[in-house]
Amino acid sequence: MDRKRKGLERGTLVPLLKEKFYRGNTLYVLVIKMAVGFVLISTAPGKEHEVYNELKKIPEIIELHPLFGEFDLIAKLETKDFNELGEIVVEKIRMIDGVIDTKTLTGIKF
């Protein structure tokens, strides 16, 4: 059954449902594709807290964690597609004062 075109019976559970509407007893689901990425971030010495606080202002970052090791922070992003993911990294994250380097890993769903 193609869920993009066919309705589902009322009460059917749909994981990660983004938008839905009913027509009569039929539930229609709008499937929204999404890109997930993990960005490893290196900061200038002593700038970790400032960079962290600036990153928290970016709405596409849904998780942010400090690290020990080669990288100082890891950010999980959710965007509408991989082009937008790249734009966030280049135009927002890399523009923050104190960010020295980034490494972006893209996620997939099994």
Image (cartoon, helix red, strand yellow):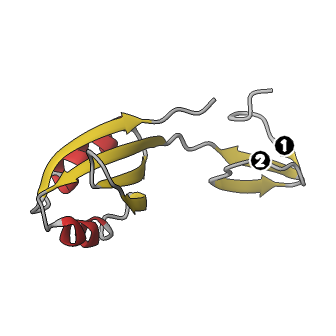
Q: Which amino acid type is marked by label 1?
A: Leu
In the image, 26 versus 55, the foreground residue is: 55
Q: Position of residue 85 (x, y in %)?
A: 33, 43
Q: Position of residue 80 (x, y in %)?
A: 43, 45
In the image, 103 versus 12, the foreground residue is: 103
Dot 1 falls on a residue whose secondary structure is: strand
Name the residue located 80 percent from the left edge and 50 percent from the top edge: 27
Q: Quadrant of the C terminus?
A: top right
Q: Which amino acid type is marked by label 2?
A: Val
**In which image quadrant can residue 3 be found?**
top right
| Label disc, if present, on residue 14 of the rendered structure | 2
Task: Determine contact: label 1, label 2, CB under 8 Å.
Answer: yes
| Label disc, if present, on residue 22 of the rendered structure | none
Q: Position of residue 39 (x, y in %)?
A: 33, 46
Q: Position of residue 65 (x, y in %)?
A: 40, 60
Dot 2 falls on a residue whose secondary structure is: loop
> Can residue 88 be seen from the camera position used here?
no
Binning the other alpha carbons within 10 Å of mark 1 as few (below 14), some (14 to 19) or many (20 upward) gives: some
Q: How much space separates mark 1 and mark 2, taking CA atoms?
A: 9 Å
In the image, 54 versus 14, the foreground residue is: 54
Vertical relation: 42 (above or below) 54: above
- Disc 1: which residue: 8
> Can residue 90 be seen from the camera position used here?
yes
Query: From the viewer's perspective, is 26 left or right of 48?
Result: right
Name the residue located 15 percent from the left edge and 67 percent from the top edge: 47
